Image (cartoon, grey):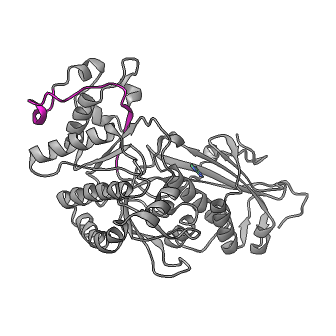
Amino acid sequence: MGSELEKWVLMVTARTPTNIAVIKYWGKRDETLILPINDSISVTLDPSHLCTTTTVSVSPTFDHDRMWLNGKEISLQGGRFQSCLREIRARAQDVEDEKKGIKIKKEDWQKLHLHIASYNNFPTAAGLASSAAGLACLVFSLAKLMNLKEDNSQLSAIARQGSGSACRSLYGGFVKWDMGKEDNGSDSLAVQLADEKHWDELVIIIAVVSARQKETSSTSGMRDTVVTSALIEHRAKEVVPKRIVQMEDAIQKRDFPSFARLACTDSNQFHAVCLDTYPPIFYMNDTSHRIISCVEKWNRAEETPQVAYTFDAGPNAVMIARDRKTAALLLQRLLYNFPPQSDTDLDSYIIGDKSILQDAGIKNMKDVEALAPPPEIKDNISTQRSKGDVSYFICTRPGGGPVVLSDESLALLDPLTGLPK
Ligand code: ADE
């Protein structure tokens, strides 16, 4: 390390995606190490629409570890942050930056302090797995700063200790979190099943559903399920292992009907297990249920699935359409059933990949108002077009894994002070 008088700041900025599980993780066998009771499979979402950006920095002038999330300083004292920091520091290597004349020996990392700034490009409160992208980005960026030798799969076992589903955000495309067998969690890690180019016709539309009440946290929900549900053991031991094999096969063959059936039934079983928990946990609401009916009716009318849906621990719907043409037809149906409130403009109601809106032939609010009911509900009087039940829609697709951003202008910390810009 340079002399204590030196004022250098060394930093790394990285961007990491979020992910949506299509075979769900629910239930831990070890709460501290975050070890699951079953394998899970996810699709990584395109980071150009949903991602976390994190800058990590080190300087001899920093006197304690500090973190800012979306511009506000937060405490790093939680056990989950501390586990990740401890595991990363334990694997840190020598670092040399010749241009800046900085040399850090691996043992110095135990004494040096860090400044971390992280930013989610989507509302943290929207229930879009921000902690998955956030903890994955923290681990990935620190691993680059401290020159770790571990590959992304080994890093995923560290991210897992920050937030279980974060381990799946270490890869793009289609990812399996292998539950592992070891008590120490060393084999509970993520592996990539296929990259994002393998099945690039898929289009993902997320309905951010307005939640009226605070949801049960996943941590306490899972604990209650494991302790009280009579169904969870059957799910973890009998159902999921078979679905994992079938889902891997469906992804490998790009078999959309199998993929959709597995994703929908697994989401439904996860919510059934929540309902089987005592006291019961309700994550979906009326809007979520109406979205399921809309998709199910259409899939039935087409005789083969056009769209898969899946819901995490909240009311938001994640819908996966088999291709762009189907996604445009889905968006028409969603806008027919869930039009925006009168004071919302279309540009802020549909975000992300707006070209789907063009494909759907919708240019303005007049086009939304003029949408005809989809043929599968023609004679159904029960269809309501209630405004305001969906806050907004995000159009996206499967995307790539973590990347280092070498453009210094994208750093969230000032290169001279190491404080937020
Ligand atoms: N929780 C939610 N978002 C996060 C982030 N970006 N980093 C760490 N924890 C988070």
Image quadrant where residue 139 sits = bottom right
| Observer able to see residue 174 | no
Q: Position of residue 131 (x, y in %)?
A: 54, 53
> At x 32% / y 38%, what residue is drawn?
286
- Quadrant assignment for the N terminus: bottom right
Q: Nearer the viewer, residue 275 or 118?
A: 275
Q: Is residue 53 above or below residue 224?
A: above
**Magenta-drawn stretch contains 364:** no
Q: Nearer the viewer, residue 109 or 371?
A: 371
As drawn, is 190 to the left or to the right of 413? left
Q: Nearer the viewer, residue 151 or 166?
A: 166
> At x 47% / y 50%, what residue is drawn?
129
Image quadrant where residue 200 sits = bottom left
Magenta part of the chain: 373-397
| Observer able to see residue 247 | yes
> At x 40% / y 17%, what residue is drawn?
343
